[in-house]
Amino acid sequence: VSAQYEHEHETNFDSAEKSASAVSKFHTHSIPLDMEDIERDWDKPVAEAGIAAKASVIVRVGMLDLGAGTGSFRVREMMHRIAYPLGVHVRADVNLTDIEASCTDGKDRITEVVDLPTTGVNTERIWLLEHFADWFNVNLGKGSMYHSQSDVSEGLMQHLDKRDASQVSADLSKRLRERQKAEQNQEGSDDPVLDALEMVTERAEVTDTTAQPLHLRDIEAASEQHNRGEREAERETKRETAGTANVTSSESTTKKARKNRNHKPPKGQYAEHFDHVGKEADQSQGITVRQAHERLDMIERRKPLYSPAFAGFASACACASFVFLLGGGPFDMIGAFIGAGLGHWLRRRLFAHHLNQFFVTFVCVAVAALACTGTLRLIGIFEPVALQHDTAYIGAMLFVIPGFPLITGGLDMAKIDFPSGIQRVAYVLCIILMATLAGWMVASIVHLNPEGFEPLGLNPVVNCLLRFVFAFIGVWGFSTMFNSPQRMCLVAATIGAITDTLRLEIVDMGVPAEAGAFIGALLAGLLASAWRSAVHRSWLAPHLGYPRICLTVPSIVIMVPGLYMYQAMFHLGQFDTLNALDWAFRAFMVIICLPIGLAMARVITDKSWRYDI
């Protein structure tokens, strides 16, 4: 059976809906969810549904992960994680913008095909999908894979309507720690609030396929029923005592009382979605197909965390910091700040209208370069030395560096997935070509001659400290541009500050730039793995368990040799082929060392990468 699974793409901007309406009838990227074989199982437990309904959930999770910018190896892992508790075997061919997956449950088989209209990066979605996978598995009776405490995942899946999901997870994590501390200090307490907390967060028994989520509404409801539940438990205990020779202990009485509290479904907008909360084992129906898709709807339709203006500010900070790390001075940083900020703001606005990526890249890079050059010439009226900083406009273009597809393409190749890897690298080359072509055309029009940055002559200690500061700011900016929550941005920025400062320092000591890039990427991968391991071992709070790819890519994007790539295009435009090839090969050697370093870190720390199985 060959089928295509469709999900209507809903934009975050009203203008976007109008812009794409003229061609929306041609956007048939998958078959609709109201197909008869899916619709008939819509309100069934997903574990009992037919293969079409199961596959719709599995493939849609893969589609959302692919659309968020992650590599094919991670998309397959996520699809297998969803398929496992459903008893479904999946074989998927994942490329840059399409998935072809064959699913079988031992009786039936179906092939689903999804093709995305474009690609992008959304690290918040990658993070939320990890929590979705844990919530899905735990509620179907399996263990948590990504997080040591699945209660945070369960609670987060109930608060997807909140704009700041990171703060929600932090609040849930804090509440869990307070509960655990209270249990240690007041074991056996009769406090109704603590009892309610224990009830709604206690893991379901083996026979119960629905784990009890942590939800404030349920805590309050359970608190109000505490006294009545205890009285009912006492009466039941008396009846059991009369019919048996053994006397039930007070501890088991309290536990039984909690199990026999009446179920009160939550009220409000998402009441139907969470109707299973508090039901007993024999009443539990598990996750239905509808509930799974509703949560995926909420993940897909989440608005960007940051406005175009704030994203433009983050881009400005990132590129200005990038310029300093390349050797630029204050005037270069000011020009890059203005140009990159305006360029990325415009890019966000144009992407809201679903315009072609390559067209948008060309226009925004040209605007950024002109804004940077115009700013420096305006400053030159008062400070003529600013007119000598012709290289600054290159820094203003660096916000378009496609770091995610570049790194994930290399990682896909490391996993011997060459179709996906080659497609991603080809996409990266197209973006770089459009960006450098636009920059070269601007340079030709306004007569710029970039020759590099003048040495600043700073004290080595001061220079090292400034590198650490600006590497931190730069990685924070790139992470914000990738739509990472602020806590994730700060973790990535810390890793990036350490690794990039080390890279630059050892290059100054005489280590080749290529080897420095490899060492920096390797250290970034090891630090990201160590961070995740510390969270998994409960050394750090559970809400800080971020995907490795969301920490490593922003931290090494700042190592991408954008200056080398532009110099190659500039000399090519001047028909100076020898210099063009020289700069191109320098850039190539550094670029390939970055994913190799990350892949080596994964081989060291991850058994699934260490062996070919």
Image: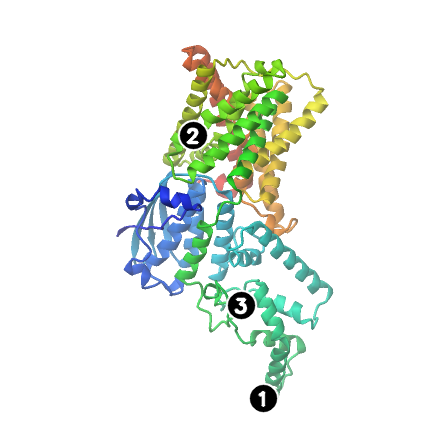
- Residue under pointer 3: 205
Q: Nearer the viewer, residue 605 or 320?
A: 320
**Residue type highlighted by circle 2:** Thr
Residue 559 seen anywhere in this rendered image of the structure: no
Comes first in the chain, label 2 or label 1: 1
Q: Nearer the viewer, residue 167 or 599?
A: 167
Mark 2 vs mark 1: in front: 2
Q: Position of residue 518 (x, y in %)?
A: 55, 28
Comes first in the chain, label 3 or label 1: 3
Q: Position of residue 599 (x, y in %)?
A: 50, 35
Comes first in the chain, label 2 or label 3: 3
- Residue under pointer 1: 243
Q: In the displayed image of the protein, which residue is found farthest to the right?
A: 185
> In the picture, residue 215 is in which quadrant?
bottom right
- Residue under pointer 2: 361
User: Which mark is on residue 612?
Assistant: none
> In the picture, residue 184 is in which quadrant?
bottom right
Whether residue 1 sits left or right of residue 126 in the image: it is left
**Residue type highlighted by circle 3:** Glu
Mark 3 vs mark 1: in front: 3
Q: Is residue 286 above or below residue 157?
A: below
Q: Is residue 347 above or below residue 216?
A: above
Q: Is residue 261 above or below residue 178?
A: below
Q: Secondary structure at mark 1?
A: helix
**Residue type highlighted by circle 1:** Gly
3D distance between C-alphas at marks 3 and 1: 26 Å
